Amino acid sequence: MKPTAKYLLLFLVLNINTFLYCQDFWEEVFTSGPTIFSMDISDDGVIYLGTANGIWKSFDYGDYWEFDTISAGNLTVYSLETGLDGIVYAGCNNHIYFSEDYGESWTSICNGCVISNFISLLATDQNIIYGGVMNGIIRSDDNGNSWQQVLLSNDWATTYCITESVDGTLYAGLTCHYTSQYSGIYKSVDNGITWEQIEVTSDFGIQSIDFNAEGNLITAVIWDQNWIFGGIYKYNPFENTWLCLKYGERSRAIVVNKIGDYYAGIDNELSNGGCRVSYDNGGTWESINYGLSNSNIMEMKIMPDGYLFCLSNYPAKVFRSIHSTLTDIKENEQLDQETSESKNVKLFQNIPNPFKETTKILYNSKEESNITVEIYDYSGKRIKVYTTNSRGKGIDYIEFNAVGLSPGIYFYSLKINGIVTDSKKMTILK
């Protein structure tokens, strides 16, 4: 190759890389007056924000937002826990509120609790609720009618996160604000009745926990045992080992997507702040701040289909990734793993749910097939039928139009070559 051609090729490669890395990763989707304390995304794609005077929610990826006051007092919402079919828990000051209709109506289920602010929440399949407070954890096994203190760590050891592994083990992340000895990860193997501190994690201020595919805990640490620097750490529960993946930044949030990429939110007190990503299990990290107008990231959440959201404060803003964090190849590989071996087509989800006019009913197709989606009302009457031919190349969708239908509960089924393979419920709001 001639020298001129070599230089031209090098010039093109460098400029292409510069072009790719300079494209915005984020776009701003929400700016409010009050402080935003919490964010959660339900499994059916509804986004909730807990603020200083109530809750904002979005059913369309953050393009449009609605406001709920919860109560006449416009309570501050410090934590949120969401489930399917409209289930929402809101942790406030001395109260937990519960909704089963996507926040249209609320019931107090911890009225009169002599507790400070509910900083974190977890509701499990066993209908047990855990509240992370400023001195440990309280627990209810009757949907909030009665509560017991199950972890009393210290008056200023705040439980910032509570989560559950696939084997049912509970983990809680604590940060003590004036002595580090009560900080670290605590675990429970008896549905939260008793807790023990994981010794190798003690003295580390834990802000957020997620799991990788191997069952290791990937944690955001705001400071280490020296009270200076934080970072991203991995705890291996099978070997009881604690490993630093990234050191020197105050980390407040961590999420792991379906294909194993790590995304971290960094406070900007001791660094440039913003968001970081690792595509190699924490071995190397890159900044992804293009499009961020505020870099003190306090929380991160991810949509079921891979779109990433991050929350910043001062001023309060929410940012959404412009593209899904799942590439086409990796996404199809992941969906193939999730698809049952006995099914060549599996219903994935519908986005958003509930919806007002249109939604995409997603499915995962492993081979070319005839696809039929049938819509039924609550009485079982079939009201709409959609048919298409799948390409057999992974994720695809049929777009459903709800114009003309009354608000309420509906059902839809997915057929492959005339055989029902999956079914789900959906909600249409006004």
Image: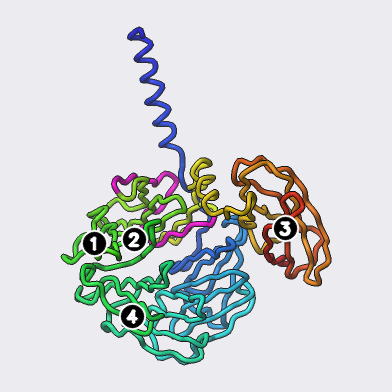
Give the side of residue 228 with respect to residue 124, left or right: left
Residue type at mark 3 is: Val
Bin the neighbour count of mark 3 within 10 Å (Cα to Cα): few under 14, some 14-19, many 20 and up. some
Give the side of residue 303 with respect to residue 224, left or right: right
Mark 4 sits on what residue?
134
Distance between mark 4 and mark 2 Cα atoms: 26 Å
Q: Dominant secondary structure of the magenta stretch?
A: loop
Query: Whole-percent x and y of residue 383?
Result: 83, 61
- In the rendered image, the residue lying farthest to the left is 226
Mark 1 sits on what residue?
242
Residue type at mark 1 is: Trp
- Sequence-wise, which precedes: disc 3 or disc 1? 1
Mark 2 sits on what residue?
216
Q: What is the quadrant of residue 98 in the picture? A: bottom right
In the picture, the quarter occupied by the C terminus is bottom right
Pick the residue in front: 43 or 274: 43
Mark 3 sits on what residue?
420
